[in-house]
Image (spheres, grey):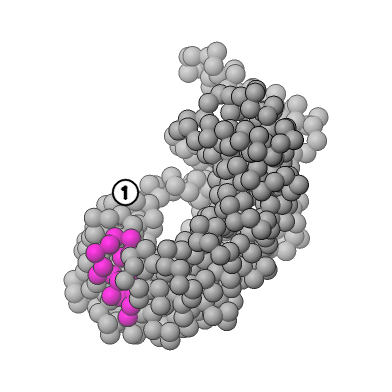
C-alpha cells in the first residue's frame, strides 16, 4: 500500500491512474482490510478527486471511495477528510464514468445521517438533481439512490422542493426508462414526507403519471405508486383529486393482488382516502367493507395492519358501520386485539371506537368482551409510548427504558374523561411562548450533563451487587450530580420548551 500511495503522486498520468486503479481493486474485498482504514490513504484518495486531476484518476478515486464507504465507520472518516465536498465538486464533470462513480460513492456515503446534512451544506443537492437528466441510465440510477437517502432528511426534502426537484422526478415517470421508475417512485414517496410538497403535488402534474403507474403490470411500480398515493392522500383536498383521477377502482382491484406488497400499500392508501366523506359513499357501493374485513385476518402483518387502518377510516361513515354490523364482522375486529403488532392494536382500537358510535355496535362490543380486551392492551400499548404512560400513570415500570425523545409535561390528572390525548412536541411548540408550559425533553445525543450522570451511575453500579446497596446509591448519586450541575453552564437539551423558540 505504501508503494501504491507513493505512485499516486507520479507526474505520469498513466502511472497515477494505474496506481489508483490498483487501490480501487483492493477495496473491492468483502471485508475492509485494516490497511484500508489508514487516514493517509483516505486523504490521498480524496486529494485525487481534485478538479485538476485527469478524469481517469477521478473515476478510480470515486470508485475507491464508493467501496470504502460500504464500511459504516469509514463513512464519517471520509466526510472528515473532505470526501463529500470533493465528490460534489465533480458532479458537473463532463466524463460519464466520473459522474457514475461519484453518484455511486455519494449513495453509499449518504447512508450516514451526518453526511445527509453535509451534502446540503456543501450545496450538493442542485448538481445532484441535474444528473437526473444524464444520458446514461446507470448515472441516473445512482443519482436516484443518492436522492432517496438525501430525502430521509427533512431539511433536504425542503431543499429538493425549492430546487424544483419534485417536478424533475415527476417528469422522469413520463420517460421511457422502465428500469428507473420504481426508484423514482420511492424517491417521490420520501419527498412527500414534506407537507408543502404534498400540497403542491397535484398542481405540478404529479397525479396522472402516478395513476398510470398504479395501473401498471409491473409489480414494483404498482406497489410504489400506491405508496406515493398514500402520502399524497393525507389532505382532504388531495383525496378529492385522487378520487376524481380514477384511482379508487384501481386501488380496490389491487387489494386482491397476489403480491403482498401491492396489497399492503393499496390498503394503506385506502386508509387515507376513506377519510373523505364523498369517497366513503363510493367505497361502500363498491363493497370495500367485506374486502377489508377479510384482509384483517391475513397472515402478513403489514396487510393486516393497513387493512385495519382502512377499515377504521371507512367506519367513520354510518353506512359502513351498519355494513359491519349486518355482516357480523365485529367479532373479527375484536380478535385483532389479541395480536402483538402495536400499530395493528392502535388501528383496531380506533376502528372499535368508530363502530361504538352506534348503540347496537356498542352492545355487541361489550357482549364480546370488548371493554376487558381494551383494558388489557392498554398497558401493552403504553409500553410503546413511555411519554404517554408517564403522563397517565405518573410512573414507569422497571423494564421501561427511557430513550431520546421521551418528554414529561406533568401529570394528566385524575379527570381522564376530559383528556383528548397527549400533545405531541410539535403541538406544544406551536403554543405561544407566554402560555407554554415547561416540558422536560430527554436527548442523550446532545445533553452532556445527562450523559455524565449516566456514565457516573454506570461506573458506580458496576461495583455494587446487593440490591440494597444499589437502591441506597441512586439517590445520593443524583443529589451529587445536581450539586455539580449547578456549577456548569446550562445544557442545550433536556431543558424546557419554554426557553426554546
Image check: 198 left or right of 287?
Answer: right
User: Does 250 appear in magenta?
Assistant: yes
Is residue 96 or residue 354 the one in the foreground? Answer: 96
Residue 419 seen: no
Q: Tell me the quadrant of the picture where the C terminus can be found.
A: bottom right
Q: Secondary structure at mark 1?
A: loop
Residue depicted at x 71% and y 36%: 12
Q: Position of residue 58 (x, y in %)?
A: 66, 45
Residue 147, image quadrant: bottom right
Image check: 337 left or right of 379?
Answer: left
Residue extent of the magenta highlight: 249-267
Residue depicted at x 22% and y 67%: 294
Is residue 310 or residue 380 the one in the foreground? Answer: 310
Image check: 7 left or right of 63?
Answer: right
For disc 1, the marked residue is 340
Q: Position of residue 16 (x, y in %)?
A: 67, 36
Residue 134, compared with residue 7, is above or below; it is: below
Is residue 296 or residue 245 the one in the foreground? Answer: 245
Amino acid at each position: 500500500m505504501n508503494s501504491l500511495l507513493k505512485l499516486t503522486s507520479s507526474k505520469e498520468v498513466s502511472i497515477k491512474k494505474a496506481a489508483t486503479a490498483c487501490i480501487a481493486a483492493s477495496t473491492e474485498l468483502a471485508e475492509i482490510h485494516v490497511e484500508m482504514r489508514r487516514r493517509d490513504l483516505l486523504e490521498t484518495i480524496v486529494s485525487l478527486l481534485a478538479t485538476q486531476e485527469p478524469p481517469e484518476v477521478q473515476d478510480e478515486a470515486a470508485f475507491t471511495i464508493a467501496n470504502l464507504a460500504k464500511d459504516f465507520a469509514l463513512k464519517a472518516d471520509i466526510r472528515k477528510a473532505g470526501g463529500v465536498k470533493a465528490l460534489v465538486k465533480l458532479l458537473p464533470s463532463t466524463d460519464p464514468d466520473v459522474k457514475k462513480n461519484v453518484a455511486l460513492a455519494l449513495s453509499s456515503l449518504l447512508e450516514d445521517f451526518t453526511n445527509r446534512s453535509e451534502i446540503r451544506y456543501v450545496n450538493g443537492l442542485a448538481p445532484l438533481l441535474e444528473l437526473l437528466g444524464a444520458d446514461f441510465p446507470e448515472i441516473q440510477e445512482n443519482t436516484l439512490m443518492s436522492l432517496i437517502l438525501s430525502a430521509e432528511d427533512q431539511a433536504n426534502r425542503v431543499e429538493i422542493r425549492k430546487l424544483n426537484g419534485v417536478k424533475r422526478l415527476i417528469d422522469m415517470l413520463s420517460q421511457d426508462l422502465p428500469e428507473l421508475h420504481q426508484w423514482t417512485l420511492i424517491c417521490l414517496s420520501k419527498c412527500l414526507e414534506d407537507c408543502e410538497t404534498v400540497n403542491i403535488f397535484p398542481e405540478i402534474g404529479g397525479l396522472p403519471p402516478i395513476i398510470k403507474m398504479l395501473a401498471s403490470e409491473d409489480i414494483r411500480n404498482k406497489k410504489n405508486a400506491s405508496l406515493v398515493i398514500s402520502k399524497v392522500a393525507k389532505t382532504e383536498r388531495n383525496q378529492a383529486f385522487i378520487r376524481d383521477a380514477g384511482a379508487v377502482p384501481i386501488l380496490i382491484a389491487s387489494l386482491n393482488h397476489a403480491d403482498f406488497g401491492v396489497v399492503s400499500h393499496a390498503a394503506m392508501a385506502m386508509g387515507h382516502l376513506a377519510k373523505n366523506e364523498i369517497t366513503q359513499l363510493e367505497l361502500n357501493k363498491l363493497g370495500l367493507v367485506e374486502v377489508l374485513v377479510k384482509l384483517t385476518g391475513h397472515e402478513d402483518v403489514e396487510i393486516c395492519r393497513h387493512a385495519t387502518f382502512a377499515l377504521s377510516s371507512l367506519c367513520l361513515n354510518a353506512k359502513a358501520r351498519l355494513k359491519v354490523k349486518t355482516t357480523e364482522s365485529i367479532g373479527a375486529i375484536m380478535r385483532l386485539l389479541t395480536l402483538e403488532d402495536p400499530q395493528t392494536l392502535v388501528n383496531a382500537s380506533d376502528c372499535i371506537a368508530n363502530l361504538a358510535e352506534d348503540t347496537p355496535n356498542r352492545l355487541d362490543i361489550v357482549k364480546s368482551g370488548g371493554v376487558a380486551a381494551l383494558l388489557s392492551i392498554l398497558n401493552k400499548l403504553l409500553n410503546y409510548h413511555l411519554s404517554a404512560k408517564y403522563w397517565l400513570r405518573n410512573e414507569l415500570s422497571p423494564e421501561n427504558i427511557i430513550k431520546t425523545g421521551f418528554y414529561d409535561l406533568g401529570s394528566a390528572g385524575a379527570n381522564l374523561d376530559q383528556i383528548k390525548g397527549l400533545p405531541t412536541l410539535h403541538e406544544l411548540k406551536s403554543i405561544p411562548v407566554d402560555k407554554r408550559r415547561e416540558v422536560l425533553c430527554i436527548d442523550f445525543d446532545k445533553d452532556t450533563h445527562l450523559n455524565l450522570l449516566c456514565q457516573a451511575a454506570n461506573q458506580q453500579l458496576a461495583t455494587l451487587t446487593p440490591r440494597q446497596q444499589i437502591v441506597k446509591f441512586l439517590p445520593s448519586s443524583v443529589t451529587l450530580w445536581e450539586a455539580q450541575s449547578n456549577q456548569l453552564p446550562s445544557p442545550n437539551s433536556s431543558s424546557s420548551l419554554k426557553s426554546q423558540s
